Image (cartoon, rainbow, N blue to C red):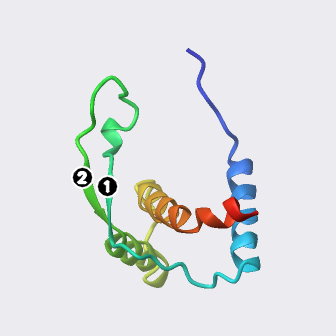
Amino acid sequence: MNKIKIEVYYIERLFERLIERLKKDGFDTLSFDNELYWNIPLKSIDIITEEPDLTIGSLEDDIHFLKSLIDEDYDTQYLELERLAAVLKNFSKKVSSFDEEA
């Protein structure tokens, strides 16, 4: 099986474009209507032959932790990608109507 790849350059450019879009649409702050969300643990994310054991995630915890990385200058670990992904996915759900209206 071939590995699926994307260069970091594309991720960087996508983030830049998304940040530009957020600013253009007047989003200086991301806000959420719900704190809790369903989370698929990383160990189960690509095992599609079984039902995953869902856990409950907390946006408040994720955001607090992510902000502390900057505010307290902690070293970033790759686990932060999971927390950031949860924030982005939940915000995407909230603003998906913007693209549907276009």
Residue that badge 1 annotates:
38
Q: Is residue 90 left or right of 20 when viewed as pictured? A: left
Secondary structure beneath disc 2? strand
Residue, x 22% and y 41% (percent of image)?
Answer: 53
Compared with 43, 61 (above or below) is below
Q: Quadrant of residue 21?
A: bottom right
Residue farthest to the front, as pictured: 101
Viewer-closest of 68 and 42: 42
Viewer-closest of 81 and 32: 32
Q: Give the percent coordinates (x, y) of residue 88.
A: 52, 63
Q: Give the percent coordinates (x, y) of residue 76.
A: 46, 64
Question: Mark 1 to mark 2: distance in Å?
Answer: 6 Å
Compared with 49, 39 (above or below) is below
Residue, x 46% and y 84% (percent of image)?
Answer: 71
Residue farthest to the top, as pictured: 1
Task: Give, as a three-letter code, the residue at label 2.
Answer: Thr
Residue that badge 2 annotates:
55
Residue, x 55% and y 14% (percent of image)?
Answer: 1
Compared with 54, 20 (above or below) is below
Q: Give the percent coordinates (x, y) of residue 61.
A: 32, 73
Residue, x 45% and y 67% (percent of image)?
Answer: 75
Which mark sits nearer the N-terminus, 1 or 2?
Answer: 1
Task: Give, as a three-letter code, the residue at label 1.
Answer: Trp
| Within-10-Å neighbours for mark 1: few <14, some 14–19, many 20+ | few
Q: Give the percent coordinates (x, y) of residue 39.
A: 32, 52
Secondary structure beneath disc 1? strand
Viewer-closest of 91 and 13: 91
Asked if the residues shown at circle 1 and circle 2 are in contact, with their CB atoms under 8 angstroms apart, the answer is yes
Q: Is residue 59 left or right of 51 when viewed as pictured? A: right
